[in-house]
Amino acid sequence: MPELAPYGRAAARLRIERGAPGVTDSSIGGPLLWPAGELWPHCPVPEADEHDGSPAMVPLAQIHARDVPGPWWPDGMDVLQLLWCPFEHWDPPIGQADLCPTVELRWRRADAHAGAPVADPPEPSASAEPEYLPEPCVFTVEHLVDFPYREELPAELRLALDQLILDTGPGGKDVITRVTGWKLGGWPTWHLNHPHTPACESCGRPMTLLLTIAGDETPGIQVGRWGELRIFTCPGDHTHPFAADLH
Ligand SMILES: [Zn+2]
Ligand SMILES: [Zn+2]
């Protein structure tokens, strides 16, 4: 279906397995290259059970550009770090997803911290929700071209796409516009609601999908009801605020 070609976007799917990642490795639930002098992030939403009111965030992912090269890297940055607050948030701050952990994202340059002391993360809160405490994992990467969900395409392409999905997926499963699992880049799926591309809070540009975090048995995490937590970022400036949604 050559008409689809202009809509292809690079994506990288992460194939996760249990492991013992080090601080300089890419990982899920592994140690972060976190400068000892930099404040460890705490959730902006107070938890009643916490003695200091705001839980320490826990490492969710560290991704090196050398392991997952692609168009999602801002100029000069080569490490992406994600942390989250291991509680469900019913009234989250702007930009965060409902009924999910709140997320913190950092872009870094690995060489800026080479050889410098690394911070010991605080222990996760004893009352943290276990499905938000990932086990240490490593991953390998599968690069692919990802395509938009049918409603983001011109109407005249949708029927042909529906047929292509039926013809190519095992048992009619959509492996063209609904790539499952953890993914960098690519397109978000909208099989549960209508497409709504978030606009950058700072400059108004339509945001692009940076990362899809899927519930996964290997690190032992779950988001929503077997859902996906998606992180959207501003394509014009990586320092503009991200937006997260749960799908
Ligand atoms: Zn929180
Ligand atoms: Zn922006």
Image (cartoon, rainbow, N blue to C red):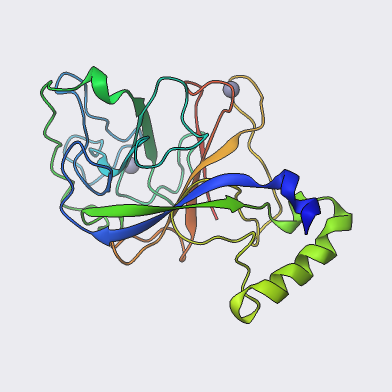
| Residue occupying the point 46% across, 66% down | 226
Q: Is residue 28 left or right of residue 125?
A: right
Q: Is residue 124 left or right of residue 75?
A: left
Quarter of the view holding residue 203: top right
Residue 107: percent from the left, percent from the top? Answer: 37, 27
Q: Nearer the viewer, residue 96 or 173?
A: 173
Residue 131: percent from the left, percent from the top? Answer: 30, 60
Location of residue 162 with respect to 214 vertically, above or below: below
| Residue occupying the point 42% across, 50% down | 100
Q: Of all residues shown, which one is farthest toward the front?
A: 2
The reply to whether residue 158 is visible in this rendering is yes
Quarter of the view holding residue 41: top left
Q: Nearer the viewer, residue 155 or 46?
A: 155
| Residue occupying the point 46% across, 43% down | 91
Q: Of all residues shown, which one is farthest toward the right?
A: 156
Quarter of the view holding residue 165: bottom right
